[in-house]
Image: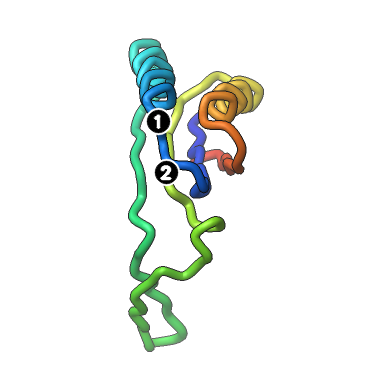
Amino acid sequence: MRYLMMSKAGGDAPDERLYREMGAFVEELTAAGVLLATGGLAPTGIRVSSVGDEITVTDGPFAEAKEAVAGFALVEVRSEEEAVELAKRFRRIVGDGESVMQRVF
C-alpha cells in the first residue's frame, strides 16, 4: 500500500535538532525501502482548471500559509496502521502541526 503523507506549513523555523532527527528518520525509512520520495513544496503554485472547452491558468498562492502543504513523503507500507505509526513518529519529531495522509491507488 502506498500513502502520500503531506505536512502543512508550521510556524517555527527548523533548528539543528530537527535537521538531525529528521535526517536519521529519513535514512532509516530509506534503508528499509519504505520511503519512496520526499520533498518540500514552494508556497506558490499554478492552478489549471477547466469547464467545458475553457481552460483557465491562475498563479498562486491559493491558501493561507498555515493551510498550505509544505512538504510530502510517499511511503510504501503493509497497512494503514503502519502508515499512521510513521505519521505519528514524524509529528513527534517536527512538533505541533498537522499532517494529512491519503492512500495512493
Picture coordinates of residue 79, whole percent (x, y): 60, 22
Comes first in the chain, label 1 or label 2: 1
Residue shown at 49%/32% (left/top)? 2
- Mark 1 lies on a secondary structure that is loop
Q: Which residue is mark 1?
A: 15
Q: What residue would you read off at disc 2? A: 71
Residue 97 pos. (x, y %): 60, 41
Cα–Cα span, label 1 and label 2:
17 Å
Between residues 64 and 17, which one lies in front from this camera angle? 17
Closest to the observer, 73 or 63: 63
| Relative height, residue 6 to residue 53 (above, below) | above
> Can the viewer see residue 105?
no
**Of the two numbered discs 1 and 2 in the rendering, the one whose residue sits closer to the viewer:** 1
Residue 64: numbered disc: none
Residue 80 higher or lower than 71, as above or below: above
Query: Horizontally, is 42 left or right of 84 in the view?
Result: left
In the rendered structure, the answer to whether residue 93 lies left or right of residue 36 reads right
Element class at badge 2: strand
Q: Relative to 52, does residue 80 appear above or below in the rendering?
A: above
- Could you tell me residue 87's position as x and y percent? 57, 29
